Image: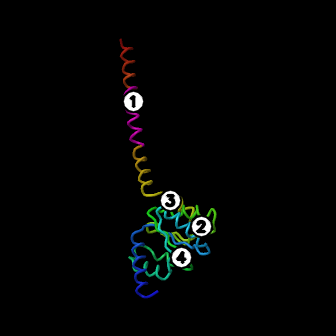
């Protein structure tokens, strides 16, 4: 690889890292070309992009980005064969990896970057699978906010019937 090609690869990786809040660093070595293509196809179907990268280029790209993003926790994962999965959904790559590993040993999760949080190691896969998307969390908050209002409105509606009935009963007693 020439110096110009390396610079171009670093720039492409910088763009990918900058444009994705969620990415997974995996080891998919020892998978056959056929299996890698199956994994790529599965990723493509679900909207996840997958790139095999050189660790030094990935680290240089991460180092060139602002420090406040917290990428430095990922550097220890950039050893050995590396494949990076970029996604718009934090849990989706974990679900893809789990699904693919039902019939294969790899890919193994080395690290995941989820909105400035770093998860290291394959043992984090179950935690990552259970992450909710931003849309799901907003929906949960809306449901939580609506619930008390519905209870109050329901009580007010039933209360008017109860108060009206009570007043009628009192009126009848008085007469």
Tell which tag, 1 or 3, sits nearer the viewer: 3
State the residue position of label 2: 123
60 horizontally vs 42: left or right: left
Which residue extends farthest top? 175
Foreground pick, 162 / 82:
82
Question: Image height check: is 174 above or below 45?
Answer: above
Residue tagged 3: 131
Mark 4 or mark 3, earlier in chain: 4
Mark toward the start of the polypeptide (3 vs 2): 2
CA gap, disc 3 to disc 2? 15 Å
Which residue carries the number 4 mark? 82
Sequence-earlier tag: 4 or 1: 4
Q: Which residue is mark 1?
A: 159
Residue 12 picture location, percent across and down: 41, 76
Q: Quadrant of the C terminus?
A: top left
Which of marks 3 and 1 precedes in the sequence? 3
């Amino acid at each position: 690889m020439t110096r110009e090609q390396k610079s171009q690869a670093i720039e492409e990786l910088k763009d990918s890292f900058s444009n994705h809040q969620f990415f997974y660093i995996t080891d998919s070595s020892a998978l056959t070309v056929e299996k890698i293509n199956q994994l790529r196809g599965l990723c493509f179907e679900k909207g996840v992009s997958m790139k095999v990268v050189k660790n030094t280029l990935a680290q240089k790209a991460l180092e060139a980005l602002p420090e406040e993003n917290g990428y430095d926790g990922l550097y220890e994962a950039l050893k050995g064969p590396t494949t990076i999965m970029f996604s718009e959904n934090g849990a989706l790559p974990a679900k893809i990896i789990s699904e693919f590993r039902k019939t294969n040993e790899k890919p193994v999760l080395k690290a995941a970057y989820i909105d400035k949080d770093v998860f290291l190691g394959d043992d984090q896969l179950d935690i990552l699978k259970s992450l909710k998307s931003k849309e799901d969390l907003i929906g949960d908050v809306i449901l939580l906010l609506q619930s008390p209002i519905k209870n109050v409105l329901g009580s007010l509606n039933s209360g008017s019937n109860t108060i009206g009935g009570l007043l009628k009963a009192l009126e009848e007693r008085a007469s």
